[in-house]
Image: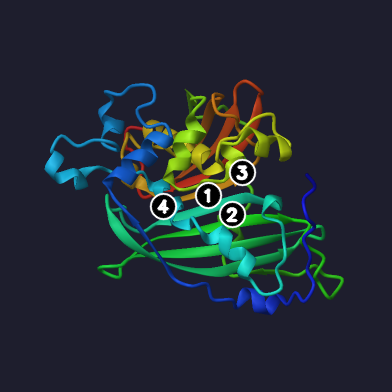
């Protein structure tokens, strides 16, 4: 099956960056929080570990709001935004040519175990790469009841075949945020401060998709084959969940509330059932990390995690 070509006819960058997305709500419960935690590997090695059991269970059944929330749960607030890209003026592209390139998350307060979230999305970056376009979308998430800003997501998507719209010799590039938040991470040549190894399950993508990302690339063997993979692949945000859990366990002493911001660059696919090795380096209040697939010796994810405070025992 050949993918339809993307086009940039009638493409006006100013219309793109000034586009107003409709505000959307995202409602979730303690069950969604627990299901997500299981989807990114919580209690995978040890169902009795109290530092991870808190993400899926609380002994007081009448007060399950005491369940704790992993900071990467905030990435779920982006669901549905990709489908809105097709509504941008002048955009005509094949969704199968979209790649999720980067994710940046800032956490302003601990995520509640259940909430109704109001999401406000806007274009934060647009870059002409010749044969492709990089589009950056920022999502501010407010607790609907209080109006308090809880977190911010910024996702960068790579639209293959949709480029070459610049009207001058200088390729068009617009960004309203600091480049250092999503630029590639330069890893130290020294040995990692900590290394955490964990094997994903063959059904990992099928479990993670229940948190709302139903792209058949992660579940349908035929779609995966059309996309050039030998079998369905793991969601990039699921791999990110594994990586940040490793940082929480190895650097934060199990305290997820030490996470201030998360930056991730998706480098390569992961097949469910493969082993993830997360390497971590300390750089002040920042943790640099890289995730490798053990079976193929390939780096699949890299980035950094900024901390509110560092464990004094480190």
Q: Residue placed at 24% from the left, 42% from the top?
A: 67
Q: Are marks 3 and 4 in contact (CB under 8 Å)?
A: no
The residue to which callout 3 is attached is 266
Counting residues from the start of the chain, the first of labels 4 and 1 encountered is 4
Q: Position of residue 213 (x, y in %)?
A: 50, 47
Counting residues from the start of the chain, the first of labels 3 and 2 encountered is 2
Q: Tell me if mark 2 has few (under 14), some (14-19) or many (20+) residues whose alpha carbon lies within 10 angstroms of its own.
A: many
In front of the other: label 4 or label 2? 4
Q: Are marks 4 and 1 in contact (CB under 8 Å)?
A: no
Give left or right: position of 117 versus 236. Answer: left
Counting residues from the start of the chain, the first of labels 4 and 2 encountered is 4
The quadrant of the picture occupied by the N terminus is top right
Q: Element type at marker 1?
A: strand
Q: Tell me if mark 3 has few (under 14), some (14-19) or many (20+) residues whose alpha carbon lies within 10 angstroms of its own.
A: many
Give left or right: position of 11 versus 138. Answer: right
Q: Tell me if mark 4 has few (under 14), some (14-19) or many (20+) residues whose alpha carbon lies within 10 angstroms of its own.
A: some
Q: Are marks 3 and 1 in contact (CB under 8 Å)?
A: no
Q: As displayed, is residue 122 above or below residue 302?
A: below
Q: Residue furthest right?
A: 169
In front of the other: label 3 or label 1? 3
Q: Tell me if mark 1 has few (under 14), some (14-19) or many (20+) residues whose alpha carbon lies within 10 angstroms of its own.
A: many
**Residue 182, which numbered label?**
2
The quadrant of the picture occupied by the C terminus is top left
Report how far apart the C-alphas of labels 4 and 2 lie in the structure: 17 Å
Q: Element type at marker 3?
A: strand
Q: Element type at marker 4?
A: helix
The residue to which callout 4 is attached is 74
Q: Nearer the viewer, residue 285 or 237?
A: 237
Q: Are marks 2 and 1 in contact (CB under 8 Å)?
A: yes
Counting residues from the start of the chain, the first of labels 3 and 4 encountered is 4
The residue to which callout 1 is attached is 263
């Amino acid at each position: 099956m050949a993918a339809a070509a993307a086009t940039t006819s009638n493409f006006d960058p100013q219309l793109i960056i000034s586009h107003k997305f409709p505000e959307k709500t995202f409602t979730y419960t303690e069950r969604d929080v627990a299901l997500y935690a299981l989807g990114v590997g919580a209690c995978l090695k040890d169902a009795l570990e109290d530092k991870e059991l808190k993400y899926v269970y609380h002994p007081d059944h009448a007060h399950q709001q005491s369940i704790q929330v992993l900071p990467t749960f905030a990435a779920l607030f982006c669901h549905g935004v990709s489908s809105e890209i097709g509504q941008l003026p002048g955009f005509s592209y094949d969704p199968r040519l979209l790649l999720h390139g980067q994710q940046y998350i800032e956490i302003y307060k601990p995520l509640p175990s259940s909430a109704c979230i109001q999401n406000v999305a806007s274009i934060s970056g647009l870059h002409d790469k010749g044969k492709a376009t990089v589009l950056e979308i920022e999502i501010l998430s407010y607790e609907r009841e209080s109006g308090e800003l809880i977190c911010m997501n910024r996702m960068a998507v790579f639209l293959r075949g949709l480029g070459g719209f610049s009207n001058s010799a200088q390729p068009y590039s617009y960004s309203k945020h600091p480049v250092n938040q999503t630029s590639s991470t330069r890893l130290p040549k020294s040995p990692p401060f900590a290394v955490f190894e964990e094997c994903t399950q063959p059904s990992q993508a099928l479990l993670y998709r229940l948190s709302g990302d139903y792209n058949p690339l992660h579940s349908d063997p035929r779609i995966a084959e059309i996309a050039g993979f030998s079998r369905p692949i793991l969601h990039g945000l699921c791999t990110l969940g594994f990586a940040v859990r490793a940082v929480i366990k190895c650097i934060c002493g199990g305290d997820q509330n030490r996470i201030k911001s998360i930056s991730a660059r998706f480098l390569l696919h992961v097949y469910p059932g493969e082993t993830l090795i997360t390497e971590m380096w300390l750089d002040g209040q920042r943790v640099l990390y890289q995730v490798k697939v053990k079976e193929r010796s390939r780096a699949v994810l890299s980035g950094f995690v900024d901390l509110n405070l560092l464990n004094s025992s480190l």
